[in-house]
Image: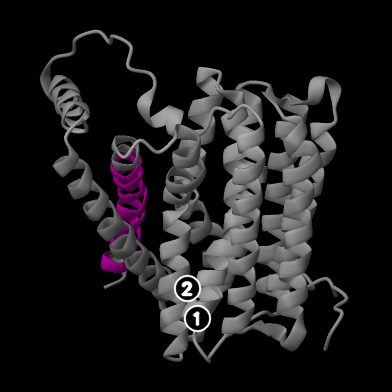
Amino acid sequence: MAVLWILAVIVGFVFLVKGADFFVDGAAGIAAKLKVSSFIIGLTIVALGTSAPEAAVSVIGGIKAAFGDSEAASVIMGNVLGSNMINILLILGISALVAKIPVEKSSRCIEIPFLIIVSLIFILLGDIGNGFTWYDGLILIVLYALFMAYTIIMAKRTQPALLEADISSAQTAEKPQRTGFFGWLDRVGAKYEELKDKTWFLIVITIVGLGLVVLGAKLVVDGATYIAQDLLMIPTSIVAITVVAFGTSLPELVTSVSAAKKGDMGIATGNIIGSNIANLLLIAGLGFVSSAGTGVPFDVSSLADGYMSIIAAAVLLAFSFAKENKLGKIAGITFLALLVAYYAYRICATLGVCPMIEIPTLFD
């Protein structure tokens, strides 16, 4: 039984990543055929597509929480806050080691400070009553809608930046011919790219992608809950901020590291900052609304994760004002060191090896 659940988590992660890929390709292709601008496609459909794993896990967790599964509720918190820490400290850390990553002026002055502000709002809402209600989720979703509206309005006044959509359609340079199994994979990939010009195929992969994301999310939530409770006998929150958070952040990891290697540096930071804002406002909001009247608890460990995500964003903001406004190897090493140190503390504190630091709250 244990082996089956571990296999379910692995398969779930594969479904999440590939489902998000299919959804992004299909939805972006359909929007392009409808002659929607590439900027709007990247800002909305593609950005939300790469966040689909987090959204699916949160919604499934919220629905299970509404039926009394408190462990599934803790998956929501670990998924959102853990993903935000991993996005900055791990993904940007690795990307900064691959190449120097410039941070745009708008990111330094608007997006990153806004991320810090909404992180504080998130903690404030959770601190009130030690949990989130469905209307807290509604507040977060409305804030995200306002942010999107502001971003679109400002984008129309400036030259659109290169976004994630470019990654899915770029890099079609000639590759050397391969034989055997890898040659077969190349032919399948070429056929896939050819079919993406057909509307019916775009519709099919969009539907299939969404289905894989939802199914993958259910496998991950159920499997992670079982592994935490019955197999490892450790709190679900630890599994959520590590295994689940990393698994749902795989699309961002692939996107940012690939962008850094290809020289599309603006994508690396834009992808992460946009994803973190979406996680706190839209993804968490959907999970809280899905929990209906049950709500989602916000305990001391979630409070620690929340403050650590703010520290990560603040460190990113500080390094963005470094020489040439670029994230270099020192920033990358610092990010990774912070992640390892915090995870070591968090796991030890949860298991009782070391005391949990008393974090002051505004409300009891």
Name which residue lies at 84% across and 85% down.
Answer: 363
Name which residue lies at 35% across and 61% down.
Answer: 9
Q: Which mark is residue 289?
A: none
Name which residue lies at 77% across and 31% down.
Answer: 105
Give the extent of the magenta segment: 4-28
Residue 235 position, x and y percent, is 56, 75
Residue 109 position, x and y percent, is 81, 40
- Of residues 263 and 351, which is closer to you in this image? 263
Does residue 285 show up? yes
**Tag 2 residue:** 228
| Whole-number angstrom distance, CA of label 2 to CA of label 1 | 9 Å
- Of residues 327 and 41, which is closer to you in this image? 41
Does residue 84 show up? no
Q: Amino acid at mark 2?
A: Ala
**Tag 1 residue:** 71
- The answer to whether the residue labelled 2 contacts the one labelled 1, judged by CB atoms less than 8 Å apart, is yes
The image quadrant of residue 223 is bottom left
Q: Is residue 304 magenta?
A: no
Q: Residues within 10 Å of mark 2 (few under 14, many from 20)?
A: some
Residue 294 position, x and y percent, is 53, 91
Name which residue lies at 63% across and 44% down.
Answer: 153
Majority SS type along the magenta span = helix
Q: Is residue 6 magenta?
A: yes
| Residue 158 sits above or below residue 145 on the image | above
Mark 2, secondary structure of its residue = helix
| Residue 24 sits above or below residue 175 on the image | below
Residue 52 position, x and y percent, is 42, 55
Q: Is residue 111 left or right of residue 231?
A: right
